[in-house]
Amino acid sequence: MEDNNYRFLFEYFIDYSDKRSLLLKEMTTSLLMSTSSILIVVIIFMITYRNLMEEKRLSDLKTDFINNMTHELKTPLSTITVAGRTLEMPQIRTNEDKILETARMIGKQSVHLNQIINMILEISMWERTQFQLDKKVIDIEEVMNDIVDSFKSGSGDCVSISRKYSFNGAKADLDVVYFTTLINNLLSNAVKYSNRDPVIDIEGTTTNEHIRIKVSDNGIGIDTVLKYNSLELTSGKSKEKLTLKEAQLLKYLIINKNKVLAREDILTEIWGEDDYFLGRSMDVFISRLRKYISEDKNIDIRTVRGMGFILEEVDLEGNQ
């Protein structure tokens, strides 16, 4: 048996005629898992980004709300303070009419202050219920006089206010709190953006079924260049849409025009802190603003080496 040899021959044949479908079958699971993973990552990123933007929006709204409410609370409080000091004057204590007038003013401002506080307390309900204005029919001229008298009492003698009303007894259906806030904001801005003693002219007219109220002043005219509420800047024939920071920075420069502003003061006012990297961002914003106002030859944002920046008015000959 040792001399017997066996030989076996085998031939293998592999059919590759349907190899594409075979490969796809093998890879289907992996492809599906990979695609699903990518989609999940993209969806998570989009949700995260949306949440971040929403948080930023809410943060901006909260900041604006705090600033507005602080301003609104100061108006009645300052009026009450001035009225209280008025009552301490000897010549007022002997005048019953003045005492009664001052007491009424304190009462009105106390009611307005209480309305503002109630509005703040009700804000937490806005997300759960539909927002509604507390409208009532009022005599527009009477309300305007109350608002202006209260504002003038709290602003001192430096503010000159003239009134030209022709409402003809018109009445309006509106929310008194928000209307008072609106007029107070206009009057406050007239004082805030004035580089001299403010002179405010208030006109009121009625046309058909509409009531028109116009408030003008002798201030620096910020709205002719910057529409802060809509973040729009108009310079010459160009019109630019600003970012919030660009608008805040330009507004700060306009308020303090012809004054050298230190870099650290600008950073603290606009960004809330003095930081090296924020300083580099501010330089970029300044460059953009210079480009935006380049068509207006009457103003210039100049760098003061070693100090900061200044928004200067330039005359037609280029003298500063």
Image (tube, rainbow, N blue to C red):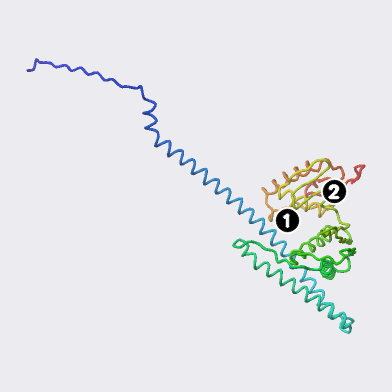
Residue 69, how many percent across, how many down?
71, 64
Q: Which mark is residue 106?
A: none
The front one of 250 and 108 is: 108
Vertical side of 19 occupied by 273: above or below: below
Q: Quadrant of residue 21?
A: top left
Residue 24, how many percent across, how many down?
39, 30
Identify which amino acid the numbered label 1 is placed on: Glu
Q: Which residue is mark 1?
A: 269
**Does residue 148 appear to the left or right of 25 in the view shown?**
right
Q: Quadrant of residue 72?
A: bottom right
Residue 171, how many percent across, how many down?
81, 66
**Does residue 9 appear to the left or right of 180 in the view shown?**
left
Vertical side of 107 occupied by 297: above or below: above
Q: Which residue is mark 2?
A: 312
Direction right: furthest residue: 317
Q: Secondary structure at mark 2?
A: strand
Residue 242, how many percent across, how many down?
73, 46
Image point 70% across, 64% down: which residue?
A: 133
Q: Secondary structure at mark 1?
A: helix
